[in-house]
Amino acid sequence: MKKTPKTDHRLWMPSSGIAGIGNAGKGLGRRRVLQGSAALAGAALAAPFASRGLLASNGDINIGVVVPLSGANAQFGINSRNGIQLVADEINEAGGIEALGGARINLIIADSTSTPSTAANVAQRMISQDNVTAILGAFASSLTLAISQVTERRGIPLLTMSFSDEITGRGFQNVFQVVSKASDIGRAQFDYTVALAEAAGESLDRVAIMYEDTAYGTSQAGGLRAAAEEAGIEIVMDEAYPLGITDVNPLIRNLRNSEAQVVFPVSYLNDSLLIVRTMRQQGLDTPAVGGAAGYVIPDFRDGLGELSDGVLSISPANYDGAPEYTERFRERFGYFMVHEALEHAALMGVLKSALEIAGTTDSDALRDALRNNTFNEGWASVMSGGEIDFDETGLNVNAIPVMVQWQGGELVTVYPEEAATASALWRGEPI
């Protein structure tokens, strides 16, 4: 069965005290901060199932959004919120959910911080107090895994762009992962790099892997490792490091001593800036191929300036694949539509379509609509692969990672060829 309605929605957001919101919060409606205590995490698992299938008292459809809006990952959360806000506003401006009499989308946004227990707490409060129909979030895989324990027990669909293999690897029925899982992204990160090196006339024999020790980093490193072993290429450095590392000099020293031809760092923003800056300041010009996250947002370029030029990264999707949609984001927020914003926008599009198909906010009907339909219209079409189709585990089987590269201040897609919008540079030279 294939049915493809469009996407749109409106937003609720936390109020004061959220770092980094600034002008990005303009145009929001009601504002609300949802906070929880550690005790609520246990309550989330012990609480009875919520009664589903009702609109909010004002006739709106409450949709929960849990993303980090403070702390080290705040910018990723802000980007995600902006993507959701854009699509939510478009949906409401176009008349809401037609199958539900024009009901408007009301986004209830909460700051997960970077703490899994907080993420679980606010998700529980959304379900218990706000009668949310579904939840989007939470960017970081460790946060999403915590939320999914709550949503699975309460029977609420959770739509996510987090990478970890565990998200759709535990047999849960209410989780939907729009991107490729991390091990597949790691494999593509490796395989695409080998292909680009070969196109540039270089045969890779020795590679290095460094990754932060969260669910995202370890899963993606596993994919890199497996791909290297299959290709018969030696991994001469394979090191985990703690998230938020402050001194990467030992890592860079080990990288230099390894004589690796390429390094695959898998890290969030602050770590990615520190790793690449230290490499370049120490005159180490080993090609760096990032693992998305910190390597594919404007803050990476802002933090490194010209040192970012030529840095490659894998990404689940890129804005230059669907400029007719993503330029609307740039016009509104002043920067290109980073992948987490794009993927969350696509998820809002899918959710709108599923609501039109289901004709109800009942969670079981909504879950069935998400699982049994292919979504390829409107914002759902901006994902790599052109359409979204969730398998029995909740994984989008049509997702295709792309290789991107910083060139002249823009992040352009350079591989695979059918998705490329620019030629790749290898060691500063066009391929």
Image (cartoon, rainbow, N blue to C red):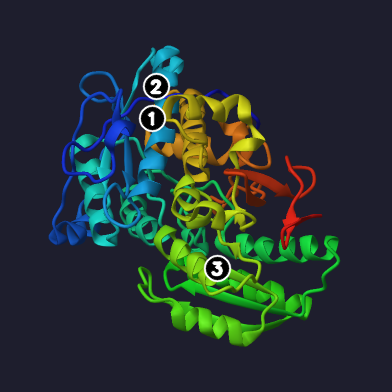
Residue at 55% x, 54% y: name it.
Answer: 393
Tell me if 323 is positioned left or right of 97 in this view.
Answer: right
Q: How far, Cα to Cα, is label 2 from label 3?
A: 43 Å
In-front residue for pair 370/343: 343
Task: Give the mark toward the camera: 2 or 3.
Answer: 3
Residue at 63% x, 86% y: name it.
Answer: 258
Q: Could you classify mark 1 by the number of other residues whose Cα lies within 10 Å: few (under 14), some (14-19), or many (20 or more)?
A: many
Residue type at numbered disc 3: Arg
Q: How far, Cα to Cα, is label 1 from label 3?
A: 37 Å
Is 274 drawn above or below residue 132 in the view shown? below
Residue 402: give x, y in percent of width and height.
67, 50
Q: Could you classify mark 3 by the number of other residues whose Cα lies within 10 Å: few (under 14), some (14-19), or many (20 or more)?
A: few
Tell me if 176 is positioned left or right of 310 in this view.
Answer: left
- The image quadrant that residue 185 belongs to is bottom right
Q: How far, Cα to Cα, is label 2 from label 1?
A: 6 Å
The disc, 2 or 3, on the residue closer to the chain's N-terminal end is: 2
Label 1: which residue? 85
Label 3: which residue? 280
Label 2: which residue? 89
Q: Which residue is the extreme one toward the bottom?
A: 257
